[in-house]
Amino acid sequence: MDWSKLPDVIAVGLLAWAFASVARRSDAPVSAHWMTGWVLIVLHFGAMIFATSNGALGAWASAIGVLALVWAGLLFTRASVPYKGEMSSRMMLVTILLSYTLYVGALMLEAPAWVLNGAALLLGLGPLTVAMIFLRRFRHLLRWVVVALNLALGTVLLAVQNRPNGGDIALNATLFVVFFGCAIHFLHMYRRATAGAFISITGFFFWSSVFVVGPLQMALFPAVHLESEVWNLPKYVVAVGMILLLLEDQVAHTKHLALHDDLTGLPNRRLFQDRLASAVERARRTRTQTALLMVDLDHFKQVNDTLGHHAGDLLLQNVGRLFSGRVRRSDTVARTGGDEFAVILESPISREEATHVGEDLLKLLHQPMELKDRAIKVGGSLGVAVFPEDAGDTESLCITADLRMYEDKRSNSKDVDYGDMRVDFDRLERPERTTEFGVMR
């Protein structure tokens, strides 16, 4: 047994433990894949302790150690696939896992040549077959990168695996493709200028290069001896990079929560005030207009009382999506209260255009929205204020829009009194039968 691998087991185990403690606090969907991958890396080093044993123990330990390394790389790659929900992606994952497991197992256990050739063909042609089956339904650049890498790998394996010392070349080529694929997927997923992204991507490129540089160094400079820790260094670099990525995502998520409404994802009052101040300053500097719309949902309390707070939450989320889809990208839709929304219409904008946008938003509220298998129409009240015609600063602009919104609400409430209304939904059997606040089945 090679107990020199024990320090690596301990070091990677401690890194995996540190990674797990960070991943537990992360909502990132990739953290589970990454955690499983690092457990497999620990298994890899643990198995390599017994790889030098004689007989079946050494052979199976070597096979398990290499397979654990391959599975870890495939899991890291899978975590970075942007289309994981696609059925073709799941088919591709199953095909790749089976083909790599079959080939590496056959290679490490010295299977007959016809088994190795068949496994190499499956490894090269399997991903291509899946891609062609789903070609009309789904296409993505990364899909063809995976297909190209595996086709090239399959070709190399068939060319070298049956030659003298071809097994070592085939194994290194396989591991190179696995971790080079990781680097490509991470490069595509984390296109941001952060330390975590840079360290992770660089680490994976170095990790894949180990399986090319290592054999070349041994062939060209056999007298030069490098400790195994040098070749294992990229693993630690990747682990540190992944931890940094999770921490960066947690910081970004915390900042997002501080400035956005947790329910709808819209800017909250704090961010709304900041953007309104910026919009007013830009309008003042360019001598143009900016408009503020205040929209309050009518009869929201009745929806909560009748269908429950969960339905009320769904209603608010739907309203946020509808409003965001109606305005320009440069405009801002914010949730500033329980059932109150604010819309900042950036310049250039006129009072007529702002009023038109507000009326369109009210029309959206009068369209039925499906909640709990029932169609809800709530309506709303609107207040419009324009800078600098109606107010010369943000506070006065908000007050003016609020006053006009409540004036509109009082005007609407003169027609129907909703105060003591209750609804028996069991009696609402036809779509044309609606309640006074617009709830229909």
Image (cartoon, rainbow, N blue to C red):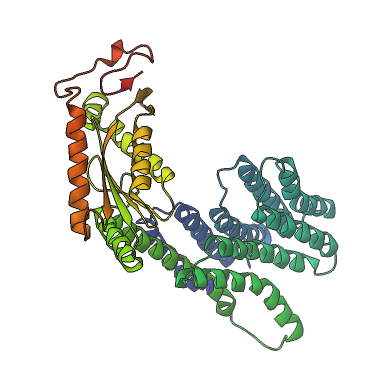
Q: In this image, 216 relative to 258: left or right?
A: right
Residue 64 image offset from top left, x and y in percent: 61, 57
Q: In this image, 129 relative to 159: left or right?
A: left
Q: Nearer the viewer, residue 202 or 122?
A: 202
Residue 29 image offset from top left, x and y in percent: 45, 51
Q: Outermost residue toward the left? A: 420
* Above-or-below relation of 260 to 51: above
Q: Tell me if I can see residue 258 in this picture.
A: no
Image quarter for residue 243?
bottom left
The residue under the point 37% across, 41% down is 356
Residue 124 image offset from top left, x and y in percent: 77, 53
Quadrant in the picture for the N terminus: bottom right
Image quarter for residue 54?
bottom right
The residue under the point 69% across, 53% down is 100
* Above-or-below relation of 166 to 27: below
Q: In this image, 362 relative to 392: left or right?
A: right
- Total numbered badges shown on the rendered structure: 0
Q: In this image, 428 relative to 328: left or right?
A: left
* Above-or-below relation of 44 to 353: below
